[in-house]
Image: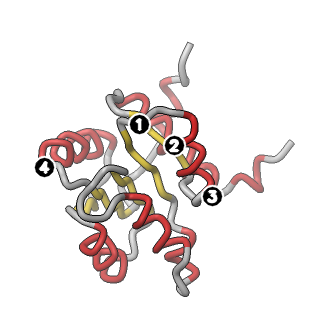
Amino acid sequence: MGMPATAIEAADFSGLHLLLVDDNKFIRILIREILRGFGFLRIAEALSVVEALERVRQNRPDIIICDWMMDPEDGLTLLRNLRGSADPHTRMIPFIMLSGEVRDDRVSMAIGEGADSYVAKPFTAATLMTHLLRVIAKQEEQYFLD
């Protein structure tokens, strides 16, 4: 049994600015279309860590979805740069790591470095939605403590 449909219908992503980082054009197109289907209107894209850092400076995204395996620098490098930033907003941007690597040590490493969520490839649109909702809710979790 999954998440109730009402939770998905109630999610309004239209006001959020998302940065999608992946060096694979096909994957970027696929994820962008899924995100548009979810209602995201503001999606910036970057093909590299350098480009992503520039987009973060220019656009101050609300959430980042980033592939781990990129060349010449990987998604973990981007995550470390963000979490080590002098800018408090940049340090706190919710970060979803995407990877074909599903080994526990890789997932633990990404979460340990500050990723808010980890999505294994291949994934479904429903899985991506679940992770987006979890990351966004985490920003306000202090209001939902039992």
Residue at image coords 55%, 24%: 3
Q: Which residue is mark 1?
A: 101
- Upstream in sequence: badge 1 or badge 3: 1
Spatial separation of the CA atoms under disc 2 and disc 1 = 7 Å
Give the x, y percent position of residue 6: 51, 29
Quarter that holds the C terminus: top right
Mark-to-mark CA distance, 2 and 3 = 24 Å
Q: Secondary structure at mark 1?
A: loop
Quarter occupied by residue 18: bottom left
Q: Which mark is residue 106?
A: 2
Earlier in the chain: of badge 3 and badge 4, it is 4
* Residue at mark 4: 25
Amino acid type, label 1: Glu
Q: Residues within 10 Å of mark 3 (few under 14, many from 20)?
A: few
Q: Quadrant of residue 64?
A: bottom left
Q: Mark 3 — residue? A: 139
Cβ atoms at labels 1 and 4 below 8 Å apart? no
CA distance for labels 4 and 2:
24 Å
Residue 134, placed above or below residue 63: above
Label 1 near label 2: C-beta < 8 Å? yes
Query: Tag 2: residue type?
Result: Arg
Residue 102: x and y, percent? 46, 32
